[in-house]
Amino acid sequence: MRQVCDLIDDRELRSIDLWTQLAVLPEYAAASTVMAFASMPTEPDTDGLFARLVLDGKTLVLPRIEADGDCIVPVVAGDSFRDGRWGIREPLGEPCDPASIDLVVVPGVAFTLAGARLGHGKAYYDRFLPTTSATTVGVCFSEQLLDELSTEPHDVLMQHVLHA
């Protein structure tokens, strides 16, 4: 699946389509605080999402991997960032309460329309998502959709899966 993602050449255009789909979800309209992710080169480009969140008056929260490397800490995105453990842009600043997050936009390597998700193998989101009651939305390119994925008991299913 990672090789499939490497071959997607219209990532920015399709990412815009994803964020348009996200914006019409009732859960998005109702959300005041949205946790997203800083995209890696093979993932949907989140810069357009960040701009949309600002225009829609929503608070953007991004994940930060703490020093122990075991868990995601949600942090309100400001102007200061660092390159994190995996070379992913992470916000500096104080963590926020996971209970304050209304919607979480989740990346993945593969998804099913039923909500199963294959991540990058570190289970960061599977450990984080049970700490919040936020609506979960998996986002991917259509090539990343599979009919089925094997799951483990700790895997958290997405409530929505959007693809472009």
Image (cartoon, rainbow, N blue to C red):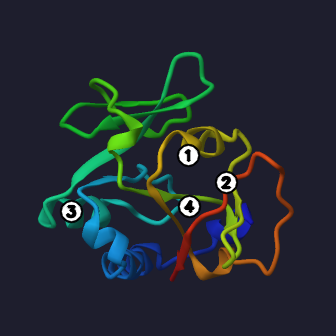
Quarter holding the N terminus is bottom right
Q: CA distance from mark 1 to mark 3?
A: 24 Å
Q: Which residue is mark 2?
A: 156
Say which label, 2 or 4, has the lower sequence index. Answer: 4
CA neighbours of label 3 inside 10 A, class few (<14), some (14 to 19), many (20+): few
Report the Cα–Cα distance between label 4 and label 3: 20 Å
Q: Amino acid at mark 4?
A: Thr
Nearer-N-terminus badge (3/2): 3
State the separation of the CA atoms marked 1 and 2.
7 Å
| Percent coordinates x, y for residue 45 in the rendering | 41, 64
Tag 3, which secondary structure?
helix
Image marks 1 and 3: residues in contact by CB distance under 8 Å: no
The residue indicated by pointer 1 is 129
Q: Which residue is mark 3?
A: 51
Labels 1 & 2 near each other (Cβ < 8 A):
yes
Which residue is more in the foreground, 78 or 76? 76
